[in-house]
């Protein structure tokens, strides 16, 4: 589908990352307080995968390690028959196990990570560097395992890559102390840099999550994405993670 990268994660769980071509998808943003562009995106990716999304659940992100849980859809009909959009509070990850609910994370350089297990337990994670070091990936995986998830897979979407992510030496040392020297890199002009992708991969390995293909592109230099670091963009692209209804197929 134009303006998005969509993958099948595990079983009937899908993930889709929007690009700037879909516009600013923040619910409650200045141009669409009703959240309709996000709802339209969810409807489009559901149609493209022959699945159903009744409601999009999103959180107010704060670069921490809190994980919210989404129950069954409460707003099955939104504007013009599109999915409803509901904020469920402050967190940096959302876990669910009900079909029809799409979990939303919004980014413009931070890492949008999609997780899923064969049991149909799935999650969307906002992994900025502060949340990464605070353990947001491990906290989310822990919540999934507490609900019965076994062999979890994870896919990383568009985020800022090491060649564009100049980083203060003191903060870089802190990141390396948590996840290893693979997080230490250089920008294209030789300045100290953080490898956020390597950090997410290290966090996944540490808690037994298998990495699978997502959308491997840099938001800063890859083109077609919002980047706060590179261009001071205020718009946000979305990650949606959802499970198709039983029996639905791509």
Image (cartoon, helix red, strand yellow):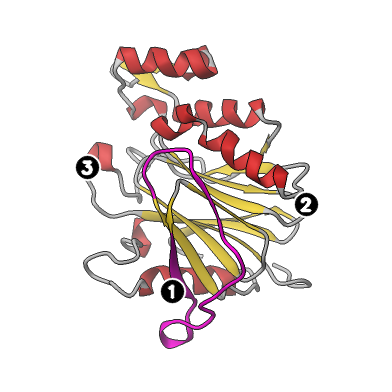
* Sequence-earlier tag: 2 or 1: 1
Q: Position of residue 33 (x, y in %)?
A: 28, 72
Find out whether the residues at labels 2 and 3 contact each other: C-beta distance under 8 Å.
no
113 inside magenta stretch: no
Question: Which labelled disc corresponds to residue 40?
Answer: 1
At numbered mark 1, what does the secondary structure look like: helix, strand or loop? helix
Question: Which labelled disc corresponds to residue 118?
Answer: 2
Q: Main secondary structure of the magenta part?
A: loop
Tell me if residue 68 can be seen.
yes
Q: CA distance from mark 3 to mark 1?
A: 26 Å
Closer to the camera in the image, 4 or 63 = 63
Circle 2 or circle 3, nearest the eye: 2
Q: Is residue 167 left or right of residue 162?
A: left
* Sequence-earlier tag: 2 or 3: 2
Which residues, given as a range, are shown in magenta? 61-88
Question: Which labelled disc corresponds to residue 109?
Answer: none
At numbered mark 2, what does the secondary structure look like: helix, strand or loop? loop
**Residue assigned mark 3:** 231
């Amino acid at each position: 589908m134009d303006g998005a990268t969509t993958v099948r994660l595990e079983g009937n769980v899908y993930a889709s990352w929007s690009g700037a071509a879909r516009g600013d998808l923040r619910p409650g943003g200045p141009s669409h307080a009703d959240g309709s562009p996000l709802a339209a995106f969810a409807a489009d990716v559901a149609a493209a995968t022959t699945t159903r999304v009744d409601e999009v659940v999103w959180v107010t992100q704060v670069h921490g390690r809190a994980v919210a849980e989404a129950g069954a859809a409460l707003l099955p009909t939104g504007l013009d028959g599109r999915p409803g959009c509901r904020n469920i509070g402050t967190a940096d990850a959302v876990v669910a196990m009900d079909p029809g609910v799409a979990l939303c994370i919004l980014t413009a350089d931070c890492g949008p990570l999609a997780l899923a297990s064969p049991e149909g337990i799935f999650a969307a994670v906002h992994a900025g560097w502060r949340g990464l070091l605070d353990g947001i990936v491990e906290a989310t995986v822990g919540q999934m395992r507490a609900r019965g998830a076994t062999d979890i897979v994870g896919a990383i979407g568009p985020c800022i890559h090491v060649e564009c992510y100049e980083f203060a030496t003191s903060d870089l040392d802190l990141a390396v102390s948590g996840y290893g020297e693979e997080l230490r890199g250089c920008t294209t002009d030789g300045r100290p840099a953080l490898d956020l992708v390597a950090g997410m991969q290290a966090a996944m390995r540490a808690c037994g999550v298998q990495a699978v293909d997502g959308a491997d592109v840099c938001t800063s230099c890859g083109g077609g994405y919002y980047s706060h670091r590179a261009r001071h963009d205020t718009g946000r692209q979305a990650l949606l993670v959802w499970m198709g209804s039983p029996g639905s197929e791509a």
